[in-house]
Image: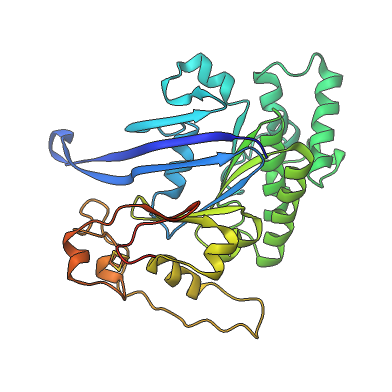
Amino acid sequence: MGGPLLRVENLVKHFPVKGALFSREVDQVRAVDGVSFCIDAGETLGLVGESGCGKSTTGRCILRLTEPTSGEVWFDGRNVTAMDAQALRLVRRDMQIIFQDPYASLNPRMTVGAIVGEALTIHKLANNAQEYDDRVVHLLETVGLHADHMRRYPHEFSGGQRQRIGIARALAVSPKLIVCDEPVSALDVSVQAQVINLLEDLQQKFNLTYLFVAHDLSVVEHISTRVVVMYLGRIVEIATARELYTTPKHPYTEALLSAAPIPDPQVKRKRIVLEGDVPNPMRPPSGCHFHPRCPRATERCASEAPLLREIAPGRVSACHFSA
Ligand code: SF4
């Protein structure tokens, strides 16, 4: 592993909420609220949290598919957030994304060959038709598909095969970083394992770096080097995958972990049931955002926001009582 390939500094994304009358902004959804982390070259960083916690928005802001409100994203020593359109187009060769829904992310009117080869055309990566065809066939075979799939359409494939098409499309430009935005959430459990194994094989083969976004801790456990846990737009814990799963420090991580299935029937874990739903991100609770649902909350938690602080080398937690 080398140094950090990606550095996210104090990233903020607030979405305006408009009123019906004259479409004036009446409020803001604080989807991402001051998020900072690094990813080393060759690493897989898991980014987890419940639906609506801001993890997918964070992934999209890194590629500037969604424009951040403030903060900086540094990729390979370059400030992505300060780039003009031309520089951004070039850097997107190195930063790709795989989307959650393989059904919605592929154009149904394009052949698989055209979908996978589109980026080759945009970035002028093939000198002639034969080279283009050879590259597309090679990409399809790399993800476990066949050359004759090239002339077929997305609807002719299963969910797992469509996700493989999405992966081949991302690989076409030989990226360094891939944001995997819930890439297996829409797939059956048996197919999930196949796609995760494929992503791991490709990481070894092409020295890829992944940001792996998921709502299910059991999915990221297997693939991640380190894990970032988010709640209501903020990071609440960062740890290595092993530390996080064996000794979670933040009560929210403990609760998420207690709900995750355990493959070994000998291992027992006490189930922590979180009260209530995720609060409205337009009006997050005072103090610690997690306090209305936290089984360990005290009076202090409702009035004082905990800092995200280092509790051991490389381990951070945003809880007054983590030690
Ligand atoms: Fe729970 Fe308080 Fe810690 Fe927040 S600061 S996680 S409410 S114990």
Percent across and percent down for residue 319 are 33, 62
Look at the image and tell me whether residue 158 can be seen.
Answer: no
Q: Is residue 105 visible?
A: yes
Horizontal and vertical percent for residue 306?
28, 57
Residue 77, compared with residue 47, is above or below; it is: above
Color style of the picture? rainbow
Q: Is residue 292 above or below residue 132?
A: below
Q: Which one is nearer the viewer's eye here, 188 or 282?
A: 282
Q: Residue at x 84, y 34 (%)?
A: 138
| Residue at 53 percent of width and 72 percent of height | 260
Left or right placement of residue 130 versus residue 217 in this view: right
Residue 58: give x, y in percent of width and height.
44, 42
In the shown orientation, is residue 1 left or right of residue 216? right
Q: Quadrant of the C terminus?
A: bottom left
Going by the picture, which residue comes out furthest to the left?
Answer: 21
| Between 134 and 33, the one nearer to me in the picture | 33
Residue under the point 67% across and 54% down: 159
Q: At which x and y percent is residue 257?
A: 50, 70
Residue at x-position 57% and y-position 84%: 268
Q: Which quadrant of the view contains residue 135?
A: top right
Is 213 or 1 nearer to us in this picture?
Answer: 1
State which image quarter holds ligand 1: bottom left
Quarter of the image where the N terminus is located: top right
Closer to the camera in the image, 261 or 151: 261
